[in-house]
Image: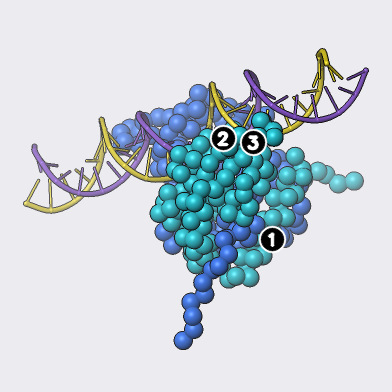
Chain colours: A cyan, B blue, C purple, D yellow
Amino acid sequence: MGYVYVMTEAPRLDRQVCFALYSASRAATAVYRPVLEQLGLTYPQYLVMLVLWENEPRGVKELGGELGLDSGTLSPLLKRLEALGFVERRRSGEDERRVAIHLTPAGRDLSGPARAIPQRLADAAGLSLDELEQLRTTLGKLTAALHQSL
Amino acid sequence: MGYVYVMTEAPRLDRQVCFALYSASRAATAVYRPVLEQLGLTYPQYLVMLVLWENEPRGVKELGGELGLDSGTLSPLLKRLEALGFVERRRSGEDERRVAIHLTPAGRDLSGPARAIPQRLADAAGLSLDELEQLRTTLGKLTAALHQSL
DNA sequence: CCCGGTTAAGTTGTGCACAATTGAATTGTG
DNA sequence: CACAATTCAATTGTGCACAACTTAACCGGG
């Protein structure tokens, strides 16, 4: 029968995985920012466009499912994307609660210039493609496990 | 002399390291949120307290250096921490431009309950300590390289 | 000593995140 | 069919991030 280990030191910032994630995430979006600025998009707006380029139209709920965001975040964001002329929001005829998000021609055209963007991060990352691949996999496992635990 | 590789597919959300970082970071703070709520702190406020528990008092600039945040973020955050009674902001005597952030007794006492928090993430992570350690190292390299590239 | 340049902190404005609530449309069940 | 429970999107309110700007204090060369 052993003793429970009692922490005697305050947790240190530089040991925290959570802070490492927070810093890396902000650094990554900072690298994307000037590139996305050329397109007139913020990073979360770019994420929404990524989902729509794969398949559209999509409902707000559906977009939220892909990105892990709720209508409180997406509703105003989508309104801004509509004001920019990249998407159109149409009330569904069959279910008046739903709002279908459609790409406009301008929104579709944006996917061309956007193709070069991910390479930007790879170039700036200072990691090999293998390391990046493994990082993505580990982060995926981590995110899934964290959501599980809630 | 080869051809430059031309992307023909729109970038896919599930292939993006950047999105993996963004998701993992939000999932991690979501795990911390209910625990920190017990202490009355948000995650960024907790980060500031971590820095202060290591060494105080600190200037706003200094805190910003550790966390990668500017006065635009920190000034109101510190005002809220002061309103909560965890820190005190004192104008420096020698250099009237500087504001030294001191812990209050209540702020110091908070480090006790806070010690158990990091274990929370480790438990929820579904990764071995080795994997977590390696993840932290990789993220550190990545963040440094990304900052370098700006 | 003065004055231009620099530095520190704060302020303003925009755009996420996220909790909590609202209101309208739909669905399930008696 | 009636109507309570559910679902979807939007709204409200708080708190970051971050850019751009402001204000006040310091510093260094003339």
Q: Please, what secondary structure does the residue beneath circle 1 have?
A: helix
Quick check: marks 2 and 1 in contact, CB under 8 Å? no
Residue for badge 2? A75
Quick check: marks 2 and 3 in contact, CB under 8 Å? no
How packed mark 2 is, by other alpha carbons closer than 10 Å (few <14, some 14-19, many 20 or more), is few
Name the residue located 56 percent from the left edge and 35 percent from the top edge: A75
Check disc 2 and give the amino acid type: Ser
Q: Count the marks: how many?
A: 3
Measured as percent of width and height from the top left, residue C3 is found at: 10, 41
- Compare marks 2 and 3 and give the one earlier in the sequence: 2
Q: Are marks 2 and 1 on the same chain?
A: yes
Name the residue located 46 percent from the left edge and 44 percent from the top edge: A85
| 2 or 3: mark nearer the eye | 3
Residue for badge 3? A92
Q: Residue A137, which numbered label?
A: 1
How packed mark 3 is, by other alpha carbons closer than 10 Å (few <14, some 14-19, many 20 or more), is few
What is the C-alpha distance between the residues marked 3 and 1? 37 Å
Name the residue located 71 percent from the left edge and 52 percent from the top edge: A142
Quick check: marks 3 and 1 in contact, CB under 8 Å? no
Residue A64 visible, this orientation: no
Which is more toward the observer, B3 or B61? B3
Q: Is residue A67 left or right of residue A107?
A: right
- Compare marks 2 and 1 and give the one earlier in the sequence: 2
Q: Chain of mark 3?
A: A
Q: Are marks 3 and 1 on the same chain?
A: yes
User: Looking at the rendering, which quadrant does residue B45 occupy?
Assistant: top right
Q: Is residue A116 left or right of residue B14?
A: left
